[in-house]
Image (cartoon, rainbow, N blue to C red):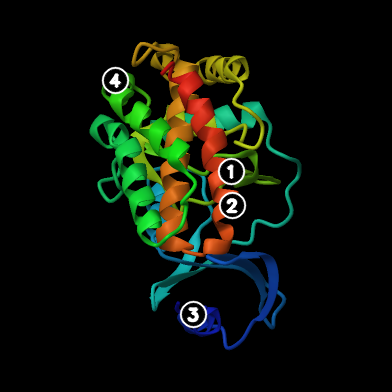
Amino acid sequence: MTANPSAELLENLLTVVGQATGTREEVRVWSMSGVERVTFPDGATAIFKYAKRPFDNEDQALRLARTLGVSVPQVHASAVLEGWLGMLMDDLGPTAREADDLDGVAAAVVLHGARTAAALPVLDQERLRTLPARALEHLGRLRKAERWQDADDVEDVLDRIAQAAETRSAGATMAPFGWVHSEFHPTSLHIGKQGWRLLDFARAFTGPGLLDLASWHGTIEPPHSVRLRVFLEQYVTAGGTPDALAERGGLSAENWALGWHRMWAIEWFMEQAIRWIDDPTTDPAYIKAVRRHLTDVLRLLEI
């Protein structure tokens, strides 16, 4: 596994922006990425963010979003080194308050109203429909590596979802279809003195905007259809497309969104487990999360 080359990345970025040196202070760091505040000799600050694959295209997504009129932090310089991306960005300073649901719908309306960008990966109906099959492929690779041996139930449920996926994925390209932030939570919306800025575009794609709206309230608590329905109605009132409330795949908009968001998360967890994190010690936590989400998917997608 490549050692984290953040020191060298920062050195390169400081050269680009014409700074000889900067003092680093950790804000939030985990195995695949980090956010630090850099203070320059004159007292000015910037945010240094670094991340490894598959999070190494965020600079492109942020620049695109900014060009298209979405309120995001400005990227002053970016560089890639040994599969790691480094960025120097605006330091937005402390938040004035936490983002609430009305802030969330306002940001979603702006993001979903932006022109689609050809550079982003696409999650259309065909791609959505194959998520359970892709998850089964990840499971096969995990089992080849003699992991997830007691997960027959996971395989059975994924098989059932795969069989229903054709019908249930209908309506995927109905509006809002375009920019999907994919990490759309209150913590990704910075409310400062200058208004709001949307952060964390590392996994942005083109797809059903309802997946963003379904992710806003998080995945720790059980999915709450009534709460999402209210959020969707607030989104439409704030200027989002009325189609956000339309049935799709034979389901209510809120159940379709929550069910497919959970299925999207399952496929991502399983890909992380075998490909990006690839650490058997994390298996029990991943299996637990996958089982919990699978139970939700069966209920929400009425399988």
Where residue 92 appears, as percent x and y from the top left, is: 65, 56
Quickly name the residue at label 2.
284
Residue 5 visible at all: yes
Picture layout, residue 258 above or below residue 147: above
What whole-number distance in Å separates the C-alpha atoms at marks 1 and 4? 29 Å
Please say if the residues under marks 1 and 2 sit with CB atoms less than 8 Å apart: yes
Nearest the eye: 147 or 209: 147
The span from disc 1 to disc 2 (Cα, nearest Å) is 6 Å
For the residues bearing labels 3 and 4, Cβ distance under 8 angstroms: no
Residue 58 in sight from this viewpoint: no
Residue that badge 4 annotates: 170
For badge 4, the amino acid type reads: Ala
Residue type, mark 2 in image: Pro
Instruction: Indicate which disc, 2 or 3, sits on the residue closer to the N terminus.
Output: 3
* Residue highlighted by disc 1: 288
**Viewer-proximal residue, 10 or 82?**
82
Is tag 4's residue or tag 2's residue first in the polypeptide sequence?
Answer: 4
Q: Can you give x and y, in whole percent of width and height, for residue 239 in the image?
A: 48, 20
| Residue to which mark 3 is pinned | 9
Query: How much space separates mark 4 and mark 2, taking CA atoms?
Result: 33 Å
The answer for how far apart the CA atoms under marks 3 and 1 are is 36 Å
Distance between mark 3 and mark 4 Cα atoms = 44 Å
Dot 4, how many residues are within 10 Å of its Cα: few (below 14), some (14-19), or many (20+)? many
